[in-house]
């Protein structure tokens, strides 16, 4: 399987139709590991694939050229979804030199015992390798997504191999953004950003500054569809996500044992809508939504209400998992309120209050809590909390 990007540059990667979990990222549309073959006076492969699919990659290369003709294998990123197959790949490419930066070589040495037996060319930021009518230029992009990450740029084609950046987890026979529903691609790109890239938004902004100065006709990421018709659309989306821009959205995430916390969640929802019908308010029960979905919805939400019943003197377990995940992703600060029910003591709601403080989110009011079923006063407090969240949202998005 292959697809032509431009003259003598082809996609030769692997479509993983059935992968559904990517280190806890819910890949419900599957994924691709994109690898690209450039045939010029020299032949270069840009990135590899996950270890089990090296045979497929080699078949795709062999359909285009003699594998003995591959001169360079560029490793933009050492994470095993791309570099996991490099050890096996190098065995089958007798004349290939691995091209990577020093950090990448060190990371690969952490995965493979025989790195020192490979021919390796170390490159640094701004270096380039001539391959005939083209050059491969290397741009270090540390922490997008790992410390060693880099882009490879072909100036003659204005083509950027962007590794994880601008990627999406979508298994499809289509290869380009104009061959697939754009709304779905952007939705998956947003999910990818929220779940993988968010903690490194500062570094993304530095990378985007480079992209602004670089003519780019096509962005070929290492996952999903290649951007050729909507380059400005995805670059603008990345600018919005990396700067933590809010939309008029309030998210209510909660878990409930016997529906008392659900009743408070509903009252908060009513309070938001009572204040403004223009606000996009969404409720997600954390045991009925995936971590991936919650993080994706949270990326651009201005306000997030967090509710949990108290179970065994703790917050509900799935809420604890969600909060651990969200802390790591380091979203932009949200307006918030903690809420929930308890039977004997309100330790679960106390936990939420501590989490909010530790993460420097802005509580719009005291926690809304109830012993067993919420009475009228609690419901009114919840509605008031919803109004305050709506006001904070309108303020931050005006
Ligand atoms: Fe697709 Fe960070 O690996």
Image (cartoon, helix red, strand yellow):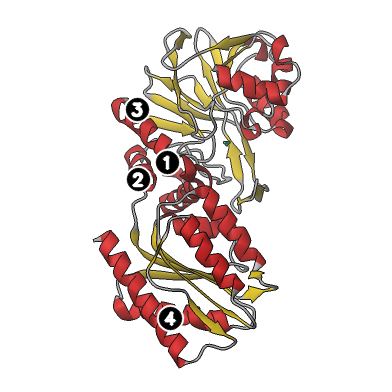
Alpha-carbon distance for marks 1 and 3? Answer: 14 Å
Is residue 272 visible in the rendered structure shown here? no
Left or right: residue 274 compared with residue 90: left
| In the rendered image, the vertical position of residue 93 relative to residue 25, given as above or below | above
Q: CA distance from mark 4 to mark 1?
A: 33 Å
For the residues labelled 2 and 4, the Cα–Cα distance comes to 31 Å
Q: Is mark 2 within 8 Å of ligand 1?
A: no
User: Closer to us: mark 4 or mark 3?
Assistant: 4
Quick check: marks 2 and 4 in contact, CB under 8 Å?
Answer: no
Q: Residues within 10 Å of mark 3 (few under 14, many from 20)?
A: few
Mark nearest the camera among 4 and 1 is 4
Q: Secondary structure at mark 4?
A: helix
N-term mark: 4 or 3: 3
State yes or no: Cβ of the residue under disc 4 lies below 8 Å from any atom of ligand 1. no
Left or right, 115 with reference to 326? right
What residue is at 45 percent from the left and 92 percent from the top? 376
Labelled pair 1, 2 in contact (Cβ < 8 Å): yes
Task: Name the disc covering residue 210, or none.
Answer: 3
Instruction: Count all numbered tags in the image, as a single digit.
Output: 4
Q: What distance separates the C-alpha of mark 1 from that of mark 2?
A: 7 Å
Vertically, is 353 above or below 358?
below
The image quarter containing residue 36 is: top right
Distance in Å between CA atoms under marks 4 and 3: 46 Å
Where's the N terminus, which quadrant? top right
Q: Give the mark nearer the N terminus: 4 vs 1.
A: 1
Could you say which disc has been placed on residue 382 in the image?
Answer: 4
Residue 25 percent across, percent down from the top left: 60, 50
**Dot 1: what SS?**
helix
Which residue in the structure is indicated by mark 1? 201
Query: Which mark is drawn over residue 119?
Result: none
Q: Residues within 10 Å of mark 1 (few under 14, many from 20)?
A: many
- Between 13 and 290, the one nearer to me in the picture: 290
């Amino acid at each position: 399987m292959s697809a032509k990007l431009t003259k003598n540059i082809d996609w030769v990667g692997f479509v993983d139709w059935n992968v559904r979990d990517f280190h806890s990222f819910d890949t419900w549309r599957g994924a691709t590991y994109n690898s690209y073959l450039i045939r010029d006076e020299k032949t270069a492969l840009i990135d590899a694939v996950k270890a089990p699919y090296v045979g497929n990659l080699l078949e795709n290369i062999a359909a285009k050229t003699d594998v003995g003709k591959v001169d360079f294998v560029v490793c933009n990123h050492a994470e095993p979804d791309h570099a996991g197959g490099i050890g096996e790949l190098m065995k089958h490419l007798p004349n290939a030199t691995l091209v990577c930066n020093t950090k990448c070589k060190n990371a690969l040495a952490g995965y493979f015992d025989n790195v020192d037996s490979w021919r390796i060319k170390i490159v640094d930021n701004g270096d380039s390798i001539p391959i005939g009518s083209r050059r491969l230029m290397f741009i270090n992009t540390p922490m997008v997504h790992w410390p060693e990450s880099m882009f490879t740029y072909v100036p003659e084609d204005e083509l950027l191999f962007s590794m994880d950046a601008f990627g999406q987890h979508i298994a499809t026979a289509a290869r380009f953004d104009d061959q697939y529903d754009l709304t779905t691609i952007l939705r998956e790109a947003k999910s990818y950003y929220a779940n993988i890239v968010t903690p490194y938004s500062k570094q993304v902004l530095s990378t985007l500054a480079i992209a602004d100065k670089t003519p780019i006709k096509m962005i070929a990421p290492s996952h999903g569809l290649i951007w050729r018709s909507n380059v400005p659309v995805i670059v603008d989306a990345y600018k919005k996500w990396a700067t933590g821009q809010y939309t008029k959205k309030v998210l209510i995430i909660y878990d409930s044992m016997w529906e008392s916390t659900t009743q408070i969640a509903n009252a908060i929802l009513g309070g938001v809508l009572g204040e403004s019908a223009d606000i996009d308010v969404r409720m997600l029960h954390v045991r009925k939504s995936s971590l991936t979905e919650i993080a994706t919805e949270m990326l651009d939400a201005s306000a997030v209400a967090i509710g949990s019943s108290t179970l065994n003197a703790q917050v509900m377990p799935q809420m604890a998992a969600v909060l651990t995940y969200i802390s790591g992703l380091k979203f932009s600060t949200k307006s918030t309120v903690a809420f929930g029910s308890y039977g004997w003591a309100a330790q679960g709601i106390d936990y939420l209050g501590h989490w909010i403080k530790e993460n420097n989110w802005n509580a719009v009011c005291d926690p809304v809590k109830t012993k067993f079923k919420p009475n009228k006063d609690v419901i009114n407090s919840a509605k008031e909390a919803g109004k305050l969240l709506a006001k904070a949202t309108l303020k931050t998005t005006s």
